[in-house]
Structure formats: C-alpha cells, structure tokens
Image (cartoon, rainbow, N blue to C red):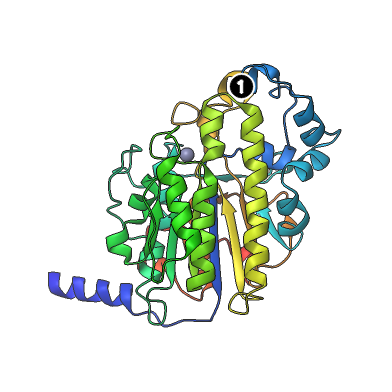
Amino acid sequence: MLVVVLASWSQVVWSQQADNGQRVVLVMTDGLRWQEVFRGADASLLTPKRYFDGRDVSELEKEFLAATPEERREKLMPFLWKTMVPSGQIYGDRDAGSDAFVTNGLNFSYPGYSETLTGHGDPRINSNDNVLNPNLTVLAWLNHQPGMEGKVAAFGAWDVIASAVNPEKCGCAVNAGYAPFTMEPMTPRLEFLNRMKAETPEVWEGEPFDAPEFYTAMEYIKAKKPRVVFVSLGETDEWAHQNNYGEYLIAAHRVDAYLKQLWDTLQAMPEYRGKTTMIFLPDHGRGSGPDDWTSHGQKIPDAKYIFMAFMGPETPALGNRMHVEAVTQSQVAATLAKILGYDWNAVEPKAGLPVGAAVR
Ligand SMILES: [Zn+2]
C-alpha cells in the first residue's frame, strides 16, 4: 500500500505535461507595507528623526509627498502605478475594499517566503533560522518538469532565501546573501559583483544591500534565459526595522526602478517578449502608526495584510482591483504554475487555488 501511495505521489509530482512557452518573474521585497503601495509616503512618518540622525528631509518631501494618495503612490512607485497596474492587476487596497493577506499566522519573513513558494503555511517554519525548507516548492517542482530542467533560478539578498528555496531539492541555480555566484562561463560583471559582496561591510547579518543581488540576477537572466526567476530583495524591511522611514521610501522607490529595469530588459529579449508575467509582492506587511510601522510578526495582527500585483499576457488588464474577494499569499504558487500551464493544486493539495481573475 505504501509503495502504491508513493508511486502515485511521485507520478503526480513529476509527470504533468503542460508547457505553454510562458515565462514568469516573481519579485518580492521584504516587508513593504500595502499602506505605502496604495497611499504613497506617509508625511507623519517622514520626519528628520526617522531619517538617520535628523538629516534634512525636505528633498524627500519634495520627491515623495503630494496632495492625494494617487499622486503620492505614483511618485513612490511610478513603474508599478503607470505600467504594471494599468496593464495588469493589483490586490490589497484596503481603502477600496480589497484585502490581500498571509495565512501562516506569523507575519514574518521565512514563513511568508515558504507560504509564497509552496502555497501553504507550515507550523514547522516558525522562525527565521537558516534551515532548509522541508517542503517541496513550486520552483523545485517546475525545475523537474520535462523541458523545464535547469530553467528555474532564484536570487535573494537575504541568505535565508537560499534555504527557503532549498537548492538541493530544487536542483536549480540559487544565490543569496554574501555567497559568491558562479556560472559557466563567468562574466567580468559577475566577478565584480562577487568582489563587491566580499569587500563591503556586513551591515545586516546575512544580507547585503539589494543592488549586488539584483544585478547578479540580471546577469544570469541575460546569459541563461531561465523560464522562471525568483528575485527577492530585502532593504525595505531592514530600514523599517531601523525606524528609518527616509531610507525605507528610497529603497521602495529603488525596487520599483528594478522592476522597470527587469521588465524593459525582458521585453527587449525575444525569449521573453510578449510571453512573460511579472508577479510582485512582499513576504508580510507591518504595523501602522509611529510606533508600530517599524515592526511585524504574530503580535501585530495587521502585519498579515500585503499587496499582490500581476502583469503579463495571461493576466487581464483589470487594474487596481476594488471591492473584490480577498486573496491570500497562499494563492501565489498555484497562480504562478497556472500561468505556465501547470496545476500546482494537483501536486500540493494544501496549496491555495490560483487567483481566478489574474489568469486567463
Ligand atoms: Zn520579512
């Protein structure tokens, strides 16, 4: 009986045939709040006290503040609001009757990455310790589908991202934290990025600034043209924990510029043009107000609220989804798989269903 169960499980896991030629880039930025994404910068948090040691904030005010939430969010994340949302969809605008939330109940990082990559919370993932994810991720499963082998890659600024993906189980290219990245052939740019990581101070444990990892991912994409890429960035969370609202805004603005750079690069490559979907979300939200905006976790229930954005040929252009059914982070894995023509729920019954309206 056990043999039969195992055989049928492995059959389900490894033998779906559905390649439709689509590509997906999944971008996550750690702990960026839905409040900034939908309302833009919060003037009450943008004070000298919350921008290092009282440095002048007037330039940031000029750059990010405006009269309305719509103007402010376009200033903060112009690519998201002028390109991604109009030609795709975004969920999580709680001011407009649209909730997006994590279901793992913990509202911190590793549980959120695992929920995103597997489609379900897991009580065993209850810390940010750098331990291998015992679960099969949608990335690992995709990398074992016929024609997809070696076409999945993951890049994380935070070193724990490698463990969340579980490189051995995935068999895919994975790079995270301060680890150097090598591929065949090496490029001068990659050698330089590895030196930058090795020779800059470790301000945050296990997590360089976003730039080296983003450009490592870009270099790999240009050289190897993977079908599925996961890019995870971390500065938004780190600056927030330091109560530095100025750098937090600048980091969010930079992530938006990275989305644009990634998208423009992909659209200029025949392998990706017109057949690539971008998915963008955080691993968790954060609290609100001057005391709680810096933090998140089980004790801040509202930190479960996130945003989720989709853009690509499989996604109808419905824009900012207002007054719609709530969506959850546990739906991302199945949505990602469905875009590529696969049924993740048949593999992982605990996973949330695809976001129905986000895939044709
Ligand atoms: Zn996080």
Few, some or many residues within 10 Å of mark 1 (<14, 14–19, 20+):
some
> Is the residue 58 above or below the residue 224 in the image?
above
Query: Is residue 175 left or right of 54 when viewed as pictured?
Result: left
**Going 72% across and 29% down the picture, which residue do you hit?**
42
Task: Locate residue 2: give its quadrant.
Answer: bottom left
Residue 262 lies left or right of residue 61; in this view the side is left
Q: State the image coordinates of residue 276 (x, y, percent, origin top left).
A: 60, 71
Across and down, in percent, residue 4 comes to 17, 75
* Of 220 and 327, the residue lying toward us: 220
At 77% from the left and 59% from the top, the residue drawn is: 86
Give the farthest residue toward the right. 67
Residue positioned 69% across, 18% down in the render: 48
Frontmost residue, 44 versus 177: 177
Residue toward you, 276 or 289: 276
Tell me if I can see residue 28 in this picture.
yes
Q: Horizontal and vertical percent for residue 301?
A: 51, 31
Quarter in which the C terminus is drawn? bottom right
Left or right, 234 with reference to 324? left
**Relative to 245, is 224 above or below?**
below
Which residue does the numbered mark 1 point to in the structure image?
Answer: 52
Q: Tell me the residue at 38%/73% (across/down).
A: 150
Q: Is residue 339 left or right of residue 39?
A: left
Is the N terminus in the top left, top right, bottom left or bottom right quadrant?
Answer: bottom left
Q: Callout 1, which amino acid?
A: Phe
Q: Is residue 275 above or below residue 203?
A: below
The image quadrant of residue 27 is bottom right
Evaluate whether residue 104 shows in this view.
no
- Label 1, ligand 1: CB separation under 8 Å: no
